[in-house]
Image (cartoon, helix red, strand yellow):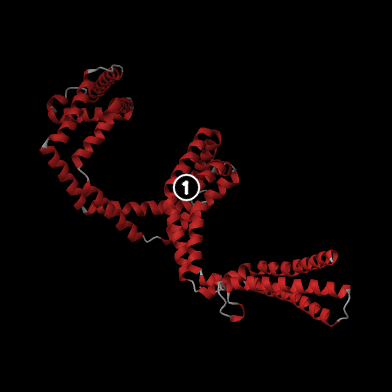
Amino acid sequence: MTSTAPDRKVTHLRRMKMLATGLLAVAAALFTLSLVLPESFGTRLLHAAAEAALVGGLADWFAVVALFRRPMGLPIPHTAIIPNNKDRIADNLAEFVKTQFLGPQALTDLILKNRPADQFAAWISQPENVTRLGMHFNKGLAAWLDLVNDREVQEFLKDSYKTLATQLDASAATASILETMTSNGRHQQLLDAALTQLQESLAESDVRSTIADGLAAWFKREYSTLERFMPTETLANYVANEVASALNAYMANVANSPKHELRKRFDATLEAFISKLKSDPDYQTRAQAIKELLLTSPEAMEYVGGLWNSARTYLVKDLTSESPKALQLTQRLGRYLGEKLTKDTELTNSLNEHLAKYVAQVAPGFADFLAGHIRETIYRWEAASIAQELETSIGADLQFIRLNGTAVGAVIGVLIFLISNTIH
């Protein structure tokens, strides 16, 4: 360890040492003066005060210096306390920090007292903070896009795709997805949506014209002779309208009948398909073949890798625009979160409690890590260096002990002298 204390600390320590030593020198000068002056009550009082001040100042000088080094280099027992007990100090300091600051109960009490979820809610409820948060997010995202290696991201996506696809049981996964889709009649909602879309399409004149054109072309191709004597275009339009109307009526009937036969067949078809995906070896083999095709297809790999290029291009374009959508989205999410947390006290209470429980769980491990770090770091420091560093940091304050010792010693010397003379 090397000294890193600022010069101002060193200068301050030097000044305080000079002040304390100066006061001690004054006491020594007064003591010497009391020896040469003619004897009188005042001389004896000065002598007693100076003597006690000198003793107190020297004793406290010894005590302060003994913390960091041997006074005057003499091998006096129980001196240089900090250098000689560096490892024990490290153990005690690490244990003190661990138990008093990082104990589960201490951290839990701290969280429940300060309620960080409430503080965050109050902070994010401020519009300027939401704006600042969005801007920081945008800047961070832009910086990340500049630093990221596109090829590495593409390879990561490809490797992830291969890993997931290799581990995936295609038939079981498809069956599971379909079961989820069919639970609580969700697949019937999909059927309703498909019927609605088909009805809307059949109602469009362009679609009916396309059907009519197809019928006319078919009639001309299959019955070319008869077609010459019949109004093909008119007949095709009529048939197309009738077919569309009939289909619309049928689909409307299905939409209004929860127990329609078509719905039952749809249910049975899906159930049979799910069952085969789970148990039919032929279906499982087909699903596996499709998976293998996707794994070995260069086009599939290019598509997966190209996803990053598309995403990156979109993000760069958005972030460089005058009104980035990413910023707007971040701000909207921030405002929503602020409103939600501010109004929902039950939610903030829950967040604070969950955070306290989580911290209590991880506190022992983190406390052990930090205590070990403190201990090992101090172990590695040189004894003389740590003594110098500590003296530079707190030595100036310790000089007040010397100042007080000299001054208090003088006062006590005067009191003892007066009491002694009063008794005699």
Q: Is residue 73 above or below residue 417?
A: below
Whether residue 395 appears in this view of the structure is yes
Q: Nearer the viewer, residue 360 or 278?
A: 360
Q: Crowding at label 1, few (<14), some or many (≥20) Cα neighbours within 10 Å?
A: many
Q: Position of residue 343 (x, y in %)?
A: 55, 33
Left or right of 269 in this view: 9: right
Do we see residue 198 in this rendering?
no
Q: Residue at x 65, y 71 (%)?
A: 9
Q: What residue sits 46% from the left and 47% below the top?
A: 359
- Residue plotted at (79% across, 74% down): 50
Depth check: give the residue in front, 64 or 108.
Answer: 64
- 263, above or below 365, in the image: above
Spot the residue most to the left.
282
What residue appears at the point 19 percent right and 28 percent down from the top-left corner? 271
Residue 211, given in percent of the width and then of the height, sits at 25, 28
Determine whether, in the image, residue 245 is placed left or right of residue 287: right
The residue carrying mark 1 is 104
Tell me the kind of residue under disc 1.
Pro
Element type where label 1 sits in the image: helix
Occupied quadrant, residue 12: bottom right
